[in-house]
Amino acid sequence: MMMFEPEYKPLRRVYGFDEVSLVPGDVTINPDQVNTRVTIGDFSFEIPVLAAAMDGVVDPKFAVALHRFGGLAVMNLEGVQTRYQHPDDLLLEVAEAPSATVTALLQRIYSEPIKEHLIAQRIKEVKDHGALCAVSVTPANTKKYAPLCIEAGADIIVVQSTVTTARHRSKSYRGLIFSELVQQVRAPIIVGNTVSFSATLELMETGIHGVLVGVGPGAACTSREVIGVGVPQITSTMDCAAARDTYHKAVGRYVPIITDGGMRTGGDICKAFAAGADAVMLGSSFAQTAEAPGRGNHWGMATPHAALPRGTRVKVGVNTSIEQLLFGPTSRTDGTENLIGALRLGMSMCGADSIQEMHDAQMVIAPSVKTEGKLYQMLQN
């Protein structure tokens, strides 16, 4: 009888926001003295926060409003804003639809063709108010729409799908080649989403200017349930940050990474930066603001997929404003408002003068971080 040891697929332990905690630094700093600026391409932003390219979150008015507070909103150019001249009626219909029928409604709404003149019109609506305009397109439509976006005045192009890589096999004779896109549009290109060291490194080697990190962590995303793909955000961010640092050391060019999704509180955001993020992208938090077009609802770009939806409409309610969400003041004790105030305080406690110094904050595995000593809070909730 032959004896042998079976070979098992190797598994490693990975971590999300609720499983880690930050260790205070040996030096503390006044919160009003820390620097939260982030640079993407040639553009610098006062706060390292982007609004996700969701139809319930960003329209031209929202993009202008967030710009005035120092952040950057990304507008979905394959959504209702570019399919309908007057999308507000459709957004109201989505907000009022029963949960049992809303996905079918979204599939019908998004079956309307994209209209190129509306792409230019929406970009112009943002630029006419003096705001920077970032727009999102899927890889399949990038070669078609990116030149039109630049001609219309878009400042930043985001190429985004559930998972994006530098090497994609398709039936197309020449698929999307990021190195060629960078040369063609001559504007900062952000690409996502990804979660691994190797995929991030390969994307950076094409010359792009930013990487979105995260597969499936968003409140409206169901990719992890539908197709089983995703890595928790702390580990994803750390792996992609390692790729960024490796690339920077090798060629001297710094490509920021943007943790996209899974964050609800100021504590989550602080942990994302300690894990290596240069900026964060928020969806459900901004969907709660009075300025968002979704009336307290939001859904991901893959939700209206005609054959395999990978998202759902999430009702979060309208209970804050952009200013209060980011800068307070707030009476909430759960960390869901005054997010920049929380980031500044977290940086000050960790002794970080800047976002890059926050990358050096010590982090520990702490599965009891939210339960230790919190019995009364847990009973009240």
Image: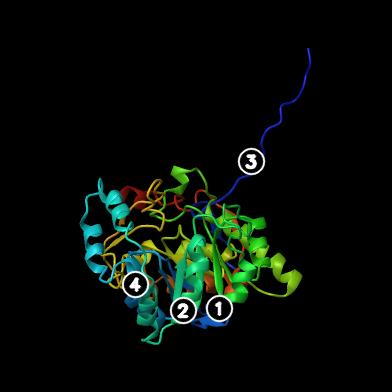
- Residue in the image at 35% along x and 51% along y: 312
**Which amino acid type is marked by label 1?**
Ala
Secondary structure under badge 1?
loop
- Marks 2 and 1, the one that precedes in the sequence: 2
Q: Position of residue 309 (x, y in %)?
A: 39, 48
In the picture of the structure, the residue carrying the numbered disc 4 is 59
Q: Are marks 2 and 3 in contact (CB under 8 Å)?
A: no
Above or below 68: residue 352: above
- Circle 3 crowding by C-alpha within 10 Å: few under 14, some 14–19, many from 20: few
- Asked if marks 4 and 1 touch (Cβ < 8 Å), the reply is no
Cβ–Cβ under 8 Å for marks 2 and 1: yes
Which mark is on residue 154?
Answer: 2
Distance of label 2 from label 3 (alpha carbons): 43 Å
Relative image position of residue 134 (x, y in whole percent): 46, 75
| Number of the front mark, 2 or 3 | 2
Q: Which residue is mark 3?
A: 11
Asked which secondary structure carries label 4, the reply is: loop
* Residue neighbourhood size for the residue with mark 2, other residues' Cα within 10 Å, grouped as few (<14), some (14–19), many (≥20): many
Of the image marks 4 and 2, the number of the one nearer the N terminus = 4
Q: CA distance from mark 4 to mark 2?
A: 14 Å
Looking at the rendered structure, the kind of residue marked 4 is: Asp
Residue 132, given in percent of the width and then of the height, sits at 44, 81
